[in-house]
Image: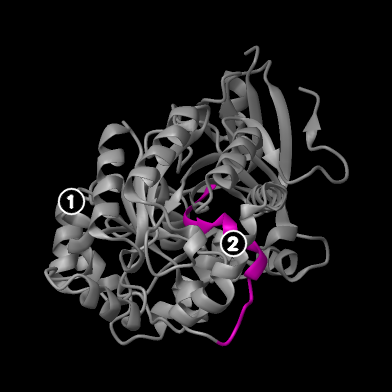
Amino acid sequence: MAGTTIVRARILHTPRDPFKHDDALETYEDGGLAFDAGGRITALGEFARVRRESPGAELLDARGALLLPGLVDTHVHWSQLGIIGAMGMELLDWLRERTLPEEARLAHVTYARATARDFLRLLAASGTTTALVFGSHFQDAQHAFLEEAARSGLRIASGLVVSDRYLLPEFHHTPDAAYDAGRELARRWHGQGHLRYAVSPRFSISCSEAMLEACGALGGELDGALVTSHLNENRDEVRAVAERFPWADHYLETYDRHGLVGARTVLAHNVHPGDAELEQLAHRRASVAHCPASNAFLGSGIFPMRRHLDHGVRFALGTDVGAGTGLGMLKEGLMAYQAQLLTPDGVRLSPAHLLWLATRAGADALGLGDVTGDLRPGKEADFVLIRPRAGGALEATLERAEGTEDALGALFALAREDSIAEVRVAGERVGPEPAGSPLHSPA
């Protein structure tokens, strides 16, 4: 079929939720994924059948590689790329001593644009096709980021971060000024290509009630916009919120009272929730970004996954760079697996669970479950090809893997940036930068 491309590879995806279905993982050892000129998937299955149905299609022969849906990062800070690995502190000290000084450098637009370009390039090089990206406090810097995001081809949701207390003075806006700046950015970028706006109060410690009200007003005006912030990450943070909002029964209520908790809300961490908060999150259909590497790096605690499951709260994975230890979602899945084994009430996760949390669960959290997250026909062709480095541990392990689930487990344990061969969004290549010979071959 003219305009159709078929990718031949070992294909794995989770079109069903493995927390609810035993047969969630769907695999094709010699698989074919076909997509049309518009980037929409038209067929998925064994390669021979897919090829037979589209005999004139262009062939991308990636035998020896594994094809997964594009990875989805539900919480990452582009403004913190420069401080990955800043060790030795818990959350509030880390913010004060390392994070805020680095973010202040984004007042210089040249530095901000260079950081944005590096961040987006590295995001794609890690296999991530979709991300909810925590932005900058500076309007010009955030405009530069969104401009670069539009050029990148990635699916990005991001917005101006707003605060009016607690942080550095240069980060503070009045509620009216924050509303106006956010509305201006949203009018320019929301819905342009693969971009969406995300209303982003930093966290309740740094926002007055008037600021949270302004955020709720802006979110209510923007059809399809997301809301993102932080929740119950660190016990000192939770205590500080209680001191600043004595009327609130819990942290979540500081957002909920101002209309900021709904089906398009993603709140990062939630390591220390109360049952009432979990009930309210489930009732509102809000989602949590689980960031296990960051939670370990800052000593915040272990995510209570079983309690989230028991209450029916949606959650997916986020890298949380720069407290997180890198932009790779496969590494984040491994960290989630390990952390759950270390708590008596932890959930024993399988490779299928990790793939779901790194792909389809994230797409659902971001309101994109009908667009991306798995490889069913009708969705857009967002995928990553993983080819083990010759002579490396991943190659040796895959050669000995006894089945597809073992192979998937090896990817989460061993595959990192050097294994990412090709990344596409809606069929268009977005990274990594080409190296070596192309994968394409004649029909």
The image position of residue 295, as x and y in percent, is: 45, 76
Q: Amino acid at mark 1?
A: Arg
Determine if the magenta segment contains residue 73.
yes
Please identify, in this view, whether the residue under mark 2 or under mark 1 is nearer the observer.
2
Q: Which of the image's four quarters has the N terminus?
A: top right
Residue 405 placement, left or right of 441: left
The image position of residue 409, as x and y in percent, is: 55, 66
**Residue numbers of the magenta segment:** 69-88
Q: Which of the image's four quarters has the C terminus?
A: top right
Residue placed under numbered mark 1 in the picture:
284
The image position of residue 387, as x and y in percent, is: 72, 53
Q: How is the image coloured?
A: one colour
Residue 28 shows up from this direction: no
| Residue drawn at x 51%, y 76% as measured from the top left | 96
Q: Amino acid at mark 2?
A: Ala
| Residue drawn at x 38%, y 82% as measured from the top left | 301
The image position of residue 342, as x and y in percent, is: 40, 86
- Local secondary structure at mark 1: helix
The span from disc 2 to disc 1 (Cα, nearest Å) is 34 Å
Seen as rendered, the residue at the extreme right is 436
Residue placed under numbered mark 2 in the picture:
104
Choose between 338 and 46: the one closer to the eye. Answer: 338
- Local secondary structure at mark 2: helix
Choose between 210 and 365: the one closer to the eye. Answer: 210
Instruction: Choose the circle earlier in sequence order: 2 or 1.
Output: 2
